[in-house]
Amino acid sequence: MRFLIIIPAHNEENNLPFTLDSLQQQSFKDFKVVIVNDGSTDKTAEVIKKYTDGDSRFETINLQKSAHQPGSKVVNAFKNGLNTQNIDEFDVICKFDADIILSENYLKTVEEAFQNNPKYGLVGGLLYVEKEGDWVYEGNSNRHHVRGPMKAYRKESFIQMGGIRETLGWDNIDAILLENLGWKEVVLPELQVKLIKVKGADYTIRPADYYGRYFYFLGLNRFLAYIASSKEAMKSKSISFFFSIIKSYESCRSQKLELKISKAEQKAINDQRWNMLKKKWLKI
């Protein structure tokens, strides 16, 4: 199988070399990397040039800086990179971040998983962060969900779901749509991916606004959005946090902001969330 790896990068001069080095050191060699320089103002372009000059598997495109909105910015950069390629030449499409370090056997293990399991549509490892000199499991998501920094899609599943969506919540929408289409999302726990920096640290959006917008753009109906908001409020032990999330969600509804999913996809997402709720809380 041949891999197409697209890496959006904005001001990643300090992190990107670790990511690209780990790709060059892969035991599996049949891949192509497209680094999308998304309006960087530091030396990211110079870093990229060192790799594109010395390795024909590495290419780059340059974009004007896009608005820094969670979700949409990185997917916009990814799509710009994807549009420069003929995906018929590839079997696996990857969206990787510019601040991760992959183990030497990462691509080989993912390739073997796809080869041996025809229904695998999305495969990845687990994220680890550095804490007091040790790499520890990040723990911000369940161990059965492939996180945004390291998505690897079987090409057929990627095409069937219509690609990833340029919206907040894209890295959960993809998994739900794939499951609805009969594909499996699989985390390989033996694959540890090192995350160099904490995600979301440079977002300007307030947490309550983030969750409200996230639940809206995920397509959740009002009931499920309120349930999800209450769960986040309980984690924060703050009633006011619940009402702030709801205010953000209702603001999006009143503005009728455009969703990047169809009505049928929205129904699939709500059905999946409702089934999870029944299974976890109602024991149905």
Image (tube, rainbow, N blue to C red):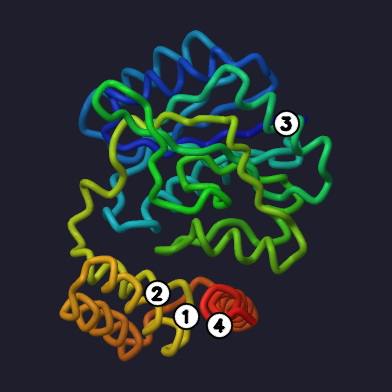
Q: Amino acid at mark 2?
A: Phe
Circle 1 crowding by C-alpha within 10 Å: few under 14, some 14–19, many from 20 = many
Name the residue at 56% across, 37% down.
125
Q: Dividing the image into 4 quarters, which one contains the N terminus? A: top right
Q: Amino acid at mark 3?
A: Glu
| Spatial CA span between label 1 and label 3 | 34 Å
Q: Amino acid at mark 1?
A: Leu
Residue hosting label 3: 111
In which image quadrant can residue 261 be found? bottom right
Label 2 SS: helix
| Spatial CA span between label 4 and label 2 | 21 Å
Query: What label does residue 282 carry, if any?
Result: 4
Residue 58 x, y percent position in the rendering: 53, 21
| Spatial CA span between label 4 and label 3 | 38 Å
| Spatial CA span between label 3 and label 2 | 33 Å
Residue 105 left/right relative to 39: right
Q: Amino acid at mark 4?
A: Leu
Tell me which numbered mark, 1 or 3, is placed earlier along the sequence.
3
Name the residue at 72% across, 45% down.
154
Q: Nearer the viewer, mark 4 or mark 2?
A: 4
User: Would you say the residues marked 1 and 2 are in contact, meaning their CB atoms lie under 8 Å apart?
Assistant: yes
Q: Is residue 125 above or below residue 45?
A: below
Label 3 SS: helix
Q: Is residue 79 above or below residue 170?
A: above
Label 1 SS: loop
Residue hosting label 1: 220
Circle 4 crowding by C-alpha within 10 Å: few under 14, some 14–19, many from 20 = few
Tell me which numbered mark, 4 or 2, is placed earlier along the sequence.
2
Residue 81 x, y percent position in the rendering: 51, 41
Q: Is residue 13 above or below residue 138?
A: above
Query: What label does residue 215 carry, if any?
Result: 2
Label 4 SS: helix
